[in-house]
Image (cartoon, rainbow, N blue to C red):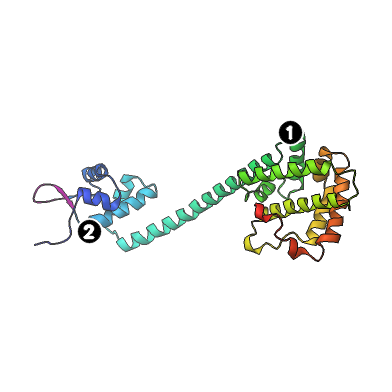
């Protein structure tokens, strides 16, 4: 008496993850012929299950049912070799799929960065923003904005909106201080706020995590110089108030030399509690 494990059509359907209707169709066309039990109902064995798994894999690889039938009914059918071939084909598909996923993730990152840039620049004149974007594209190696957008990918839209509000509040305060000397207490307190914003944005853009050591003295001096040497930065600050770029540049250098220098560890977390 044959005591080999038998499956009903519903049991095989659940095991293989295919519909009962599909199994009926495969039976009808001879692709997966069932056995008939004593009660006349369809029955399947472990061999059927293995064969069905082959069919499913070939279907995933976009073989037609006719092609699958020809492969499985070949007189020199070698199950082990078929499994090896299927594994090889699936690995190739996996590689192609991963490339597609990588491309999608890259596109999503670019779009997220683009959205964040639009948020950060949302209160500035659109014609200036478009001109700045063209200038940014010209200085990238690829000649596109994608590299710049990718640098903003780690910010969420909510974080970008928060940074935009913080900068707007800071710039309104700084505009009221332009008549004061750059070394004055009020100006230097405002520059410290500027450093906090810079430190926080650098942390989020670089996605530094536990390795973040804060914006260094040298880094902030370089950032200060960019306020007047970078056409985009200078144009942006001058948009808020004529003479602001030069005043801020000097104030930042004073802060760097008289407060930040030698005290980078003290300021490395400044602003991060608001991130």
The residue shown at (8%, 51%) is 38
Provide residue 37's location: percent of width, then percent of height: 11, 51
Position of residue 237 in the picture relative to residue 83 (left or right): right
Which percent across, then down, holds residue 135?
Answer: 77, 42
Which residue is the site of mark 2?
A: 46
Determine the secondary structure under disc 2.
Answer: helix
Q: Residue furthest front?
A: 185
For residue 194, which numbered disc appears in the image? Answer: none
Residue shown at 23%/55% (left/top)?
Answer: 48
Residue 252: x and y in percent read: 84, 53
**Mark 1 Cα within 10 Å, few/some/many (few <14, many 20+)?**
few
Q: Residue at x 85, y 39 (%)?
A: 241
Judged from the image, the secondary structure of the residue bearing numbered disc 1 is helix
Q: Residues within 10 Å of mark 2 (few under 14, many from 20)?
A: few
Per the image, the residue denoted by label 1 is 126
Q: Quadrant of the N terminus?
A: bottom left
Nearer to me, 67 or 114: 114
Is 119 left, or right, of 92 in this rendering?
A: right
Residue 63 image point, x, y percent: 37, 47
As for residue 225 lying within the magenta part, the answer is no
Vertical arrangement, residue 263 with respect to residue 119, above or below: below
Segment colored magenta: 35-43
Label 1 and label 2: CA atoms lie apart by 68 Å
Relative placement, left or right, of 268 versus 48 is right
Camera-nearest residue between 173 and 65: 173
């Amino acid at each position: 008496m044959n005591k080999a494990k038998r499956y009903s059509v519903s049991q095989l359907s659940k095991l293989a993850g295919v519909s009962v209707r599909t199994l009926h169709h495969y039976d009808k066309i001879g692709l997966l012929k069932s056995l008939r039990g004593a009660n006349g109902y369809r029955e399947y064995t472990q061999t059927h299950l293995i064969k069905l798994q082959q069919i499913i894999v070939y279907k995933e690889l976009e073989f037609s049912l006719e092609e699958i039938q020809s492969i499985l009914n070949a007189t020199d059918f070698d199950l082990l070799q078929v499994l090896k071939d299927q594994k090889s084909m699936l690995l190739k598909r996996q590689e192609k799929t991963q490339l597609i996923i990588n491309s999608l993730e890259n596109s999503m990152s670019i779009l997220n960065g683009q959205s964040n840039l639009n948020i950060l620049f949302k209160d500035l004149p659109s014609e200036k923003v478009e001109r700045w974007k063209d200038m940014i594209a010209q200085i990238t190696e690829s000649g596109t904005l994608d590299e710049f957008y990718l640098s903003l990918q780690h910010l969420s839209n909510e974080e970008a909106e928060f940074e935009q509000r913080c900068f707007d509040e800071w710039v309104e305060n700084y505009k009221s201080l332009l008549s004061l000397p750059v070394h004055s207490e009020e100006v230097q307190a405002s520059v410290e706020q500027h450093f906090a914003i810079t430190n926080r944005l650098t942390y989020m853009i670089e996605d530094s995590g536990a390795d973040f050591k804060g914006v260094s003295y040298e880094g902030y001096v370089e950032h200060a110089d960019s306020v007047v040497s970078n056409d985009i930065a200078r144009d942006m600050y001058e948009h808020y108030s004529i003479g602001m770029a030069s005043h801020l540049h000097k104030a930042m250098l004073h802060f760097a030399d008289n407060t930040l220098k030698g005290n980078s560890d003290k300021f490395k977390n400044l602003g991060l509690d608001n991130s």
